[in-house]
Image (spheres, rainbow, N blue to C red):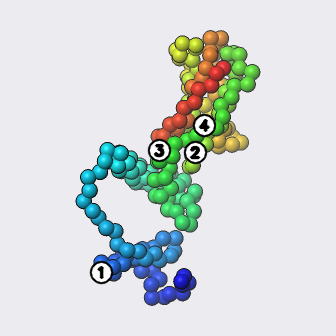
């Protein structure tokens, strides 16, 4: 039975012997059994997950050490989520390129490629690489974020590229996760 008024347990944290552990989350007291630690021999895939989690933990701590990044994560966190948890989750989820399009692309200077990229927190940058049929790079550079939408980016061709055949679009998020997509021009 859920109790809303329990002045004895309100704000409790710590352990009660080896039986119970008290902690606070979003202004509520949570009571649980203590963790049980076992000696184990992890498989290669379990060790890979553990290593990735250690990397995520290191990222979250470093991100929150920067006051601007900490403020950004704090602004997006909800009541049941700390900025640390949000940074940790952000590390595990790469951005997604929803759509990349080059309408009326002829390889002329000023032609544009529009990219719609999303992330659970924020897409940090989008890079575009223009290539010929054999995969040689003709031109590359960063796309610029749209003023209207944080998820829309535009790359403008700097010089004439009549041999342009495809574009490789790479979106990066704050932890450095990257996602790429190719677009036929």
The answer to whether residue 58 is above or below residue 39 is above
| CA gap, disc 3 and disc 2 | 11 Å
Query: Element type at marker 4?
Result: strand
The answer to whether residue 123 is above or below residue 100 is below
Residue linked to disc 4:
97
| Residue drawn at the location 52% of the way across and 70% of the way down | 26
Front disc: 3 or 1 = 1
Q: Which mark is residue 152?
A: none
Label 4: few (<14), some or many (≥20) within 10 Å?
Answer: many
Counting residues from the start of the chain, the first of labels 2 and 1 encountered is 1
Label 1: few (<14), some or many (≥20) within 10 Å?
Answer: few
Circles 3 and 4, Cβ within 8 Å, touching? The answer is: no
- Specify whether residue 142 is in view: no
| Residue drawn at the location 52% of the way across and 62% of the way down | 81
Residue linked to disc 1:
17
Q: Is residue 88 left or right of residue 129?
A: left
Circles 2 and 1, Cβ within 8 Å, touching? The answer is: no
Residue linked to disc 2:
119
Q: Position of residue 56 (x, y in %)?
A: 41, 50
| CA gap, disc 2 and disc 4 | 9 Å
- Specify whether residue 181 is in view: yes
Q: Which mark is residue 175?
A: 3
The answer to whether residue 127 is above or below residue 162 is below
Q: Is residue 66 left or right of residue 139?
A: left
Circles 3 and 1, Cβ within 8 Å, touching? The answer is: no
Label 2: few (<14), some or many (≥20) within 10 Å?
Answer: some
């Amino acid at each position: 039975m859920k109790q809303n008024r329990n002045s004895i347990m309100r704000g409790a944290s710590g352990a009660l012997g080896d039986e119970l552990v008290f902690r606070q989350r979003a202004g509520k007291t949570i009571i649980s059994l203590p963790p049980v630690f076992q000696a184990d021999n992890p498989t290669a895939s379990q060790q890979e997950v553990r290593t990735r989690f250690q990397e995520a933990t290191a990222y979250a701590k470093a991100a929150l050490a920067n006051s601007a990044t900490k403020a950004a994560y704090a602004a997006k966190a909800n009541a049941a989520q700390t900025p640390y948890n949000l940074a940790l989750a952000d590390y595990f989820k790469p951005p997604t390129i929803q759509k990349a399009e080059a309408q009326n692309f002829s390889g002329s200077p000023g032609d544009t490629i529009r990219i719609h990229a999303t992330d659970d927190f924020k897409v940090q940058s989008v890079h575009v690489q223009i290539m010929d049929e054999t995969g040689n790079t003709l031109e590359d550079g960063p796309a610029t974020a749209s003023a209207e939408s944080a998820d829309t980016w535009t790359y403008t061709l700097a010089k004439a590229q009549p041999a342009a055949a495809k574009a490789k679009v790479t979106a990066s998020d704050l932890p450095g996760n990257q996602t790429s997509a190719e677009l036929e021009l």
